[in-house]
Image: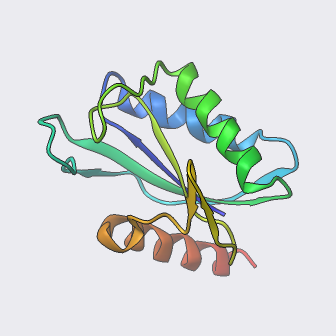
C-alpha cells in the first residue's frame, strides 16, 4: 500500500514525522520504505504556500476502509480541518494504491484518481519500488 503525506501549514516537517511514526505503528501493518521528502507547488485554485510531500510503502492486513479511518484520525491529531477543497492543510494523507485492489466508494477511490496528474507521486513510487527491491 502506498500512502502519500503532504503538509503546507505550520511545522511541515513535524507533521510528516508524526504521520510516519503513526502509520508505522498501525496494527497489523509494517513500514517497508519511505521516499525522500520533496517540496512542491500547491495544486488547485486556492492560493497557498508550498507543500512538503513524501510517500510511504506499507504492508498491511487492514482493509482500505480501516486504513482510511486511521488516516483521518492521524490528520485530526495534527489539526486538519476539511473546510476548503484543495485548500491548505496541516496534514493530508491519501491512499494512492492498495496492492492491485480497486475501490470505488463515495469517500474512497483506489487507485487515487489524481495519481496520473501528480508527477511527484510517480517519482516517489519509483523511488520506493527501487528501495524495496534493494532490501529484499
Where residue 75 appears, as percent x and y from the top left, is: 54, 30
Q: Position of residue 120 (x, y in %)?
A: 33, 65
Q: Is residue 41 left or right of residue 110?
A: left
At x 21%, y 41%, the residue is 50
Name the residue: 55% across, 23% down: 76
The residue positioned 37% from the left and 31% from the top of the image is 12
Question: Could you tell whether 50 is left or right of 57 in the image?
Answer: left
Please tell me which residue lies in front, 44 or 130. Answer: 44
The residue at the point 44 percent across, 52 percent down is 54
Q: Position of residue 49 (x, y in %)?
A: 17, 35
Q: Nearer the viewer, residue 22 or 103?
A: 103
Who is closer to the viewer here, 55 or 1?
1
Q: Is residue 73 above or below residue 104?
A: above
Question: In this rendering, is residue 32 above or below 131?
Answer: above
* Residue 115 location, quadrant: bottom left
Instruction: State the quadrant of the N terminus.
Output: bottom right
The correct choice, above or below, for 110 with respect to 37 in the image is below
Amino acid at each position: 500500500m502506498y500512502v502519500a503525506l503532504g503538509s503546507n501549514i505550520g511545522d511541515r516537517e513535524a507533521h510528516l514525522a508524526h504521520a510516519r511514526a503513526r502509520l508505522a505503528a498501525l496494527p497489523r501493518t509494517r513500514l517497508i520504505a519511505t521516499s525522500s521528502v520533496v517540496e512542491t507547488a500547491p495544486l488547485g485554485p486556492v492560493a497557498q504556500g508550498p507543500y512538503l510531500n513524501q510517500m510511504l510503502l506499507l504492508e498491511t492486513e487492514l482493509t482500505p476502509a480501516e486504513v482510511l479511518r486511521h488516516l483521518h484520525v492521524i490528520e485530526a491529531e495534527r489539526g486538519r480541518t476539511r473546510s476548503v477543497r484543495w485548500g491548505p492543510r496541516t496534514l493530508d494523507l491519501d491512499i494512492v494504491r492498495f496492492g492491485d485492489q480497486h475501490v470505488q466508494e463515495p469517500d474512497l477511490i483506489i487507485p487515487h484518481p489524481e495519481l496520473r496528474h501528480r508527477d511527484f507521486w510517480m517519482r516517489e513510487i519509483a523511488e520506493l519500488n527501487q528501495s524495496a527491491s534493494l532490501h529484499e
